[in-house]
Every structure is written in structure tokens, then in C-alpha cells.
Amino acid sequence: MQFRKQAAFVVVAAGLVVAGAGGAGLALTRHPVAPHYPAATVLPAPTGPIEAVPQRQSVKVSLPVSLTIPSIGVQTSLVHLGLTATGALQVPPTTAVAGWYTGSPPPGAVGSAVIAGHIDSVAGPGVFYRLSSLHAGDRVYVRRADGSLAVFRVTVIHSYLKTAFPTADVYGPVPDAELRLITCGGTFDYATGHYVSNTVVYAVETS
Amino acid sequence: MRVKIKLKHFVRWAALLIALPALLLAVVPRAASAATASSGNGWVRLAHLSPNTPAVDVYLYSFGDSTAELVLHHVAYGTVSSYQALAAGDYTVAMRAAGAAATTKPALSATVDVAAGGAYTIAGLGPESGLRLQVLQDKLTTPPGQVLVRIVQASLQQSKVSVTWNGQPTVSGLKLGGVSSYETVSPGTASLDVTGESESSNSTITLAAGTVHTLVVLDGSKGLVIDNLLDAAGSGTPPVGGAATGFGGTAPRVPSALPWLCVIGVGALIAAAGGIGLRRRPRPTA
């Protein structure tokens, strides 16, 4: 009799402990956690004839076909991007490729060439997932249709709220051959389905 | 080719040397463009646009530093260098006769205050008898979808030139060594007419939206030659706002509550089972 009662008490206590642990676990995991993905594989630099930095300003350069960023393992073909009906930058149709904005100068010509890519899909990393971990001095390679390479050196990485996007800095004229790499960043707004910021990598052509 | 510099030239240059830096500092506005965000650099390019002045060596010094940062040898009439990115600050540009030792006193010099995001053309302008080294401020912004064009008159054969772009007078009566202000024109392919007193030049050029150009009128072997310099280029139609380049699959998110709710449920079931055991009355013994 006594034994039976004692056993029942132990069972109730154990059940309450388990439920309490569950409650504590629930309470302690109500903050957002960033998913982790394996580190980038560093790629070898592409090989090919490296086009000199344009000395003559009106030199025509061939159109870009692919992009390699060895330090963050990016290797992608480049699609052509235009503008949406509202005048915003069109984005690549898949999250696995980046695109060149055809309204900007081609990479390696005088001016600010623009390449955009997704940071992620709904399921996981996109082509520019690691763009924000680039450092000043990292190299960016763009291969052109004629097989030649334009090599860029990262100068600075900025994050901007989309509501305060510095259009003139990113898309405005510059006197040398530069590159802008654009992706999303900052907080993801689950209500709108958009990130609130853009990450922009600025790079200048080097030889 | 070595150039013999006459004494009277030296006197003239010396006078200019004293007067110019002060004059230029006063004239050149310090204006930073939007490009400041990309780096703390400005840009400088060097040009020889004096028709009857022999080739020169051009030196660029960081102000107060006697070692040149950049030396361009044997720069002949009509030559324009590419832009050199420089940390913001004061610089001195010195011209010496081609081949003259770097230690010799420069024939001409000018000081430029390079602002972060500013672009400058430092040009030898005018006839040899009135040669001057001028710092030109180059623009780096265009009205949306438009083109900026500036004319430099560097022809000795024509003392004045007038320019029409697509039949529309753009610059008129520009004298040798003169530099027009930037004019806004529509992008596209159009005819460019440059007319002097005895010669004229007609060409078809294409100017893309969002670009800034300097058109230099030069004496060629067969009349006027127009050198179309691209000062800067950007997106002709800048996209509006930011870019929608993400779907949130890697964004930090609150983990699912389900596993913990299961644990709570299991605990509650166990406790309930124990509670039933407590309340059940013991079976009567036979």
C-alpha cells in the first residue's frame, strides 16, 4: 500500500520535472538563431589573359560572362539584368547565379559596373551568401565574352538600409574602372518577405 | 627629343611659377562628388594640350615631398593620361622639358587640392608663348539620363572654335586654351560639328546616358581632330531604391517550439498517470 503510493508520488514528480524542463527549454529558445552553413571553399584564381586597366577612356570592352570571387568560393555565370516595371533593379531569376545590370558600364570599362546576386533562397544560401565577409584587398575576377579577365580589388564594403539606398554612390559616374557587387543583408522582415538592407561591395580594377 | 629652353622662357615661366599656385588654389573649388563613399580617394589626370609646346616630362608630387609619386615621360601635344587615384590631399604637378633631370627647376608647376571623390584634369593649355598649367575640376554627376559635354580648345590653327551638337549650338567662340563649362546634352548618336575660322570638322559620335565627356579640339595633320575623352561613366538610368536580392532562407529565425511542446506534453502525461495512481483506491483484499 505505502509502496504503491510512494511510487505514484515519484511518477507525478518525475512528470512535473520533465514538463518543467520542456517549459524552460521553450522559454530559453524564443530568440532568433542564425543557421550555420559549412565554410566557403577557397577557389583558385581563374587563369586567362588579364586585360589592362583602360588607359584610353573610350576603349570598348567585351561583355561579362562569368564571375569568380576565390576567397568566398563564388563561381557563377552572369545573366543580364534590366529594370523592373517600377524602375527597380531586376534580380537574377534563380538564387544560384549573379547578373550584370546592362544599364551600367561593362566590367573593365571606365565607370561603375553593377553586378547583383541573391544572398539566399527560401531554403538556404544563394550565390552572394558570403559577400559581406569579403575584405578590402580581396580579388574579384570577371571573365568577358572574348575570354579576357578583368581583375578588381575590393576597396570597401557597406551596408545600407534600402530606404536610404545611396543611388549616386552605387550607380553614379566614376572616372576609373570600378565594380559594385550588390546583395541583401541586415534584418529579414518576415512580414514583407524582404531584407531591410543591401550589402554593397566596392572594387576598383587592378592589373 | 631634347628641348632647349631659352632664357626669356625661363623668366616667363618663373613669373608664372610664382603666380600660378596661389591663383589656382583660389580658383579651384573643393567639391566632393558622391563617389566619396567608394574610397577616400580623388583622381587626377595629366594632359599636354598646348599645340606648339614641345614634349614635356610631367611629375606629380605629394605636397612637400621631393620624391615624385608619378612621372610621365615625353608627354607630347594631345596626350591625356588615364586618371590616377590619389589619397585626398595637396599635390604639386611640375612640367619639365622632356629629358630634363628631375632635380632641375620645373618650367611650370601647379598645386591641386585633391578632395575625396573629386576628379581633376591638370592640363598645359594655350600657345607656347602663353603656356599655362591649369587645374580643371571634372564633373562626376550627370542630370538623370543625360550627358555632360565640355570643350577644350587646343588648336593653334584656329584661334576660335564653335561647336554644335546635333545642329544645336553648344559652345561658341572658344579661344585657344579655353575650356567651356559642362553642357547638358541628350544621349545617343549625333553629329558633332566643330567650326573654326578656316577649318571645320564633322563627326558622328555616340554618347551614352550617364556619362561625362571632354571633347578636345586638336590640330591634326589634316585639319581639326576631335579627341573624345570619357571623364566618367555610370548607369544611364540608375535603378530606383535597393535590390530585392534575398528570400530569407538564411536569416536568423526563432526555432520551432514543437520539440519543447512535446517534452511538456510527455511530462504532463507522466504526471497525470502518477496522479491517477495516487487517487485510485486500493483493491479490497479477499
Image (spheres, coloured by chain):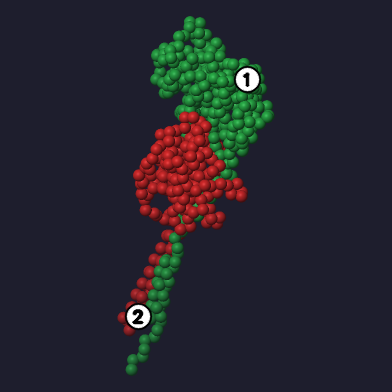
Quarter of the image with the C terminus of chain A is top left
Outermost residue on the front side: it is B222
Task: Please name the residue that numbered disc 2 is placed on.
Answer: A5
Between B15 and A79, the residue placed more toward the observer is A79
Q: Which of the 4 image quarters holds residue B58?
A: top left
Q: Colour of chain A?
A: red
Q: Furthest-top residue in view?
A: B7
- The answer for how far apart the CA atoms under marks 2 and 1 are is 118 Å
Q: Amino acid at mark 2?
A: Lys
Tell me: residue A30, above or below residue B222: below
| Residue matched to label 1 | B199
Picture residue at 59% right of the left edge, 32% below the top = B205
Q: Who is closer to the viewer here, A201 or A68? A: A68
Question: The N terminus of chain A appears in which quarter of the rendering?
Answer: bottom left
Q: Chain of mark 2?
A: A
- Determine the secondary structure under disc 1: loop
